[in-house]
Image (cartoon, helix red, strand yellow):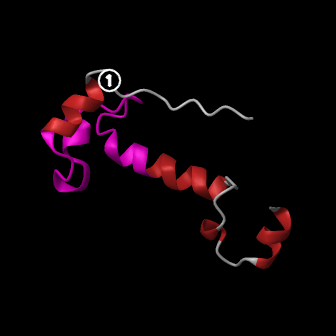
Amino acid sequence: TFDRLEQEDDINRIHDYFSYEHFYVIYCKFWELDADHDLYISRDDLVKHCNGAISNKMIDRIFSGAVSRYIYKFH
């Protein structure tokens, strides 16, 4: 991975690497979504994402608890 990073100008093309730049982009998007800055993305915050691009049905599904983390196991 480090050899590829040396050769690649755009680190976003390398998917098995996570940098501070990647973190910062995610953090800034989170901060934009979290309107009251309580460090929690609420239903109301998510409704406003991309001018309502996420449907109410999808938001209901997310907040229902049916969505969980994917656990990746190394073999």
Farthest residue in the top direction?
Answer: 65
Region rendered in magenta:
29-56
In depth, the one of 58 and 35 nearer the eye is 58
- Mark 1, secondary structure of its residue: loop
| Quarter containing the N terminus | bottom right
Three-letter code, disc 1: Ala
Vertical order, 75 against 30 (above or below): above
Q: Which residue appears at 82% of the width and 73% of the height?
A: 6
Instruction: Report x, y in % for residue 16.
Output: 69, 55
Residue hosting label 1: 66
Q: Which residue is at 62% across, 58% downward?
A: 21
Q: Which quadrant of the structure image shows residue 55?
A: top left
**Quarter where residue 46 is shown:** top left
Relative vertical location of residue 20 with respect to residue 68 in this rendering, above or below: below
Looking at the image, residue 26 sits to the left or right of residue 11; the answer is left
Residue 59 in the image, given as x and y percentages of width and height: 22, 35
**Residue occupying the point 15% across, 36% down:** 57
What is the tally of numbered marks visible in this picture?
1
Q: Residue at x 51, y 32 (%)?
A: 70
Q: State left or right for residue 49 relative to residue 18.
A: left
Q: Position of residue 20 (x, y in %)?
A: 66, 53
